[in-house]
Image: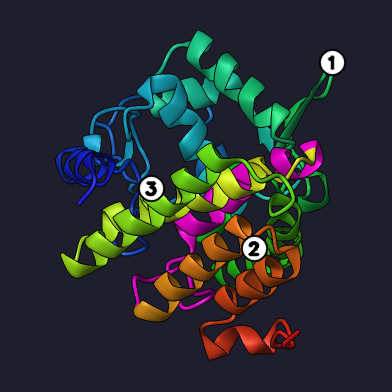
Amino acid sequence: MSTLAHTMMTAARSADSGLASPGELDRYPYAEAPAVDRVGVSAWDGADPELGRVGRRAGGSRGRGLHGQLVQQLGQMIVSGDLGADRPLVPEEIGQRFEVSRTVVRESLRVLEAKGLVSARPNVGTRVRPVSDWNLLDPDIIEWRAFGPQRDDQRRELSELRWTIEPLAARLAAGHGREDVQQRLMDMVEIMGHAMAQGDALTFSRADSEFHSLLIQVAGNRMLEHLSGIVSSALQVSGGPVTGCDRPNEASLAHHGRICDALAAGDGAAAETAMRQLLTVHPEVERVVPAPREH
């Protein structure tokens, strides 16, 4: 095993991944706060009864801090539909409901506004925006949708998007001939192989994510490069048989290796074909995208 493979596998085993699986992700992970007098609590009557103070339980915080946790809570509620379109969000009520400062509430709402989930206007206040206004390519929104009521649609849409992005990126990357990048990609395949042999799904997933992100980044197209984070998010939240990257298996590993071989040979068509085959390892995908044609 190479030094890089050993280091990456050791780090993965010793560090928290920061990602919750569908079965581990609490819908609203914080226990209800002790009963206190709150102004305007009726505005939250439709919310989950377990919703409460931010930051009192580590399971859902993932190291985000109070500000990040509140963004996570409100974002999940909006994406799940518990806070529907045009719903007013009163900062004072949010602060009391989650027992956080006005500064935390204000900064959290600004983040949600940047994601297109809410809008703030003078004399109108802050309101939830309709789905058509959301930044659906935002990694957080991808995650919230993937673990919410829209999970099936989100995973299908991600699969379709990857089918559009990654075969082209593989073809373009084959024309760059950068030996350092090719070596790094082969290192990732080696790590994936060792991880699969040891049943280390976490290390496999991390190496897989780096492989695909790196491939897109070296395609030489800055607009494609901008989408590399979306592919990483897709790999992290797939949670089901959507593509050949979702689970460690021999077929997936072999296709990754074929992509590396095609890149080393500068064969863009072969790289594109190998990527299409990788993305259709599972038969479920054939209902979304056609099987690749042999060249």
Please, what is the three-letter code of the amino acid marked with disc 2? Leu
User: Residue 120 in the image: x percent, y percent?
Assistant: 77, 23
Identify which residue is drawn at 67% across, 89% down.
287
- The stretch in magenta equals 222-249
* Residue under pointer 2: 158
In three-dimensional space, the C-alpha distance between marks 2 and 1, rounded to whole angstroms, equals: 36 Å
Q: Is residue 90 left or right of residue 295?
A: left
Q: Which residue is mark 1?
A: 122
Any magenta on residue 273?
no
Asked whether 115 or 291 is in front, the reply is: 291
Q: Secondary structure at mark 3?
A: loop
Query: In front of the other: label 3 or label 1?
Result: 3
Rendered image quadrant of residue 286: bottom right
Disc sitting over residue 221 in the figure: none
Which one is nearer the viewer's eye here, 36 or 233?
233
Looking at the image, which residue is at 72% across and 82% down? 289
Q: How far apart in space, not on screen, are marks 3 and 2 (Cα)? A: 24 Å
Residue 177, how many percent across, how many down? 66, 46
Q: Residues within 10 Å of mark 3 (few under 14, many from 20)?
A: some
Check if mark 2's residue and mark 1's residue have beta carbons within 8 Å: no
Residues at badges 3 and 1 in contact (C-beta under 8 Å)?
no
Residue type (three-letter) at the residue carrying disc 1: Pro
Q: Are marks 3 and 2 in contact (CB under 8 Å)?
A: no
Mark 1 closeness class: few <14, some 14–19, many ≥20 residues within 10 Å: few
Q: Does residue 151 appear to the left or right of 165 in the view shown?
A: left
Q: Residues within 10 Å of mark 2 (few under 14, many from 20)?
A: many
> Which residue is disc 3 drawn over?
28
Q: Secondary structure at mark 1?
A: loop
Name the spot of residue 137 as percent of width and height, x first. Answer: 70, 46
Q: Is residue 229 magenta?
A: yes
The extreme top residue here reads 103
